[in-house]
Every structure is written in C-alpha cells, then in structure tokens.
Amino acid sequence: MSKAASPTLPTTARGQATRQRLLDAAEEVFGAKGYERASIVEITGLAGVAQGTFYVYFSDKRAIFGELVTELGHELRGLVARSVAGAGDRMAVERAGFKAFFTFIAAHRNLYRIVRQAEFVDEQLYRSYYRRLAEGYTAGLARAIEAGEVARLDPETLAWCLMGIGDFLGMRWVLWEERDLPDHVLDTMTALIHHGMAGEAG
C-alpha cells in the first residue's frame, strides 16, 4: 500500500459528498496539470470548499492522490464485475468486461495520466493498482480454464497479456480520439482473444 497517511472517512452524507467533491476535483486537476504542478488550493477551489476543509479528509497532496488512484481502481473493478455478471461463456465475459473498461475510461479520461504519474509519486501504489486488477482477472480466467472454456495456459500471464491489449486500445481510440471504441476494433480484439493470431494458418 501507499506510504501516505490513511484518509479520514466521513460518517455523514454531507461529509461523504464533500470528500467526493474533493476527489472529483483532484482527478481533474491532477489529470490536467500533473502531480507536481497541482496544488491543494486548485483542488479546493474547484471543489468549492474552504482550504481548511481539505485537511479534515486528507493529510496532504500525496494522500489525496493515493486515495484517488485507489478509488478509481475500486470503481473500475466494481463496474467490470457488475458488467460481466451473467454474461455467459468466457468469450462473452471478455467482451462485456472490455466494453465496461472502455466505458469507464471514457468517463474518466484522466485515468491514464493519473495512473502513470503514480509510478513516480508512489511506485508501490502504482504496482498495487495493476496487481489488484490482475488478481481478479487471473481468478476468473483460472475458473474458465477449469471449466474448459479457455485453453490450459498460465492464467496470470494471460491476465497481464489481456490487460495490455485493453490498455493500448483504450489509449488509441478512447483517450487520443475521444470516441467510443469502434465496433470493428472490439470485434477484432474479441476474435484475437478467441482464436489467436495463427487462426486457420496455425
């Protein structure tokens, strides 16, 4: 986990809403300006709260950055889990899961910049973000392998390979072009996952 101090979690609805406004503002400021140039003054100003209020919830800039990365990862994993529930066989799960991922990054376009900054702000946090994604993915693939839906490959290696595919496709179309992933791209990705590159030539 991050070396930053643990955040104070509010117990009231009003406190929870204030904390979320701060996190939403931090997502925008860190994404636009980068960690080093971002300031607590800018975050509180965008959130519409007094600067002193910031310290009720977070000890410093690094603390809110760490909590932002953690919460974005939690939200992403939750959305994917809900989206694949009842999807059917593993190929349907893969397609539904990737669509959920692309939908999430479309709504959180600063995610790429923020997570990449984490490598330099807090490398342990950066690694934890990806490892937690990979853990759930690996477990799902292992179950599919045992069910005979996926070839007997190493599920952890497979999870990281597939995460890399999603990461770069999202960067290419959703982040750079600011558009939904085209259907033909999703179809090509799904076919690659299903059949591999060799196909009939193999």
Image (cartoon, grey):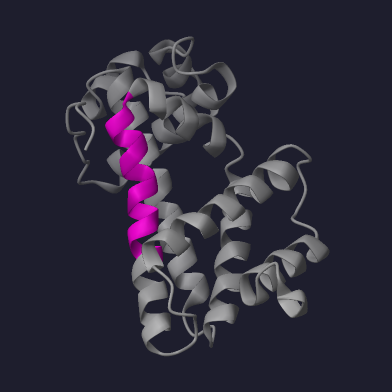
Q: Is residue 102 above or below residue 112?
A: below
Question: x and y percent of residue 142 in the render?
Answer: 36, 75
Residue 109, image quadrant: top right
Horizontal relation, residue 158 to residue 197: left or right: left
Q: Tell how many labels.
A: 0
Q: Nearer the viewer, residue 178 or 184?
A: 184
- Whether residue 19 sits left or right of residue 189 in the image: it is left
Judging depth in this view, the residue of 92 and 19 nearest the camera is: 92
Q: Looking at the rendering, in which quadrant would you find the N terminus?
A: top left
Which residue is depicted at the point 36% across and 28% down? 65
- Which residue, as the protein is rendered here, is positioned at the far front? 202
Q: Is residue 187 left or right of residue 121?
A: right
Extent of the magenta region:
122-137
> Front-most of 188 and 8?
188
Q: Quadrant of the C terminus?
A: bottom right
Q: Nearer the viewer, residue 145 or 179?
A: 145
Vertical arrangement, residue 35 with respect to residue 181, above or below = above
Q: Is residue 18 visible?
A: no
Is 155 located above or below residue 61 in the figure? below
Q: Is residue 129 magenta?
A: yes
Q: Position of residue 120 (x, y in %)?
A: 39, 21
Q: Quadrant of residue 32?
A: top right
Is residue 151 shown in magenta? no
Instruction: Look at the magenta stretch and give its main secondary structure.
Output: helix
Residue at image point 39% right, 73% down: 140
Is residue 117 something that shows in the picture?
Answer: yes
Residue 143 is situated, as x and y percent measured from the top left of the image, at: 36, 81
Residue drawn at the location 49% of the way across and 23% of the way down? 30
Taking the spot 22% from the left edge, 21% from the top edge, the residue there is 59
> Residue 62 placed where, x, y %?
31, 21
Left or right of 118? Residue 80 is right
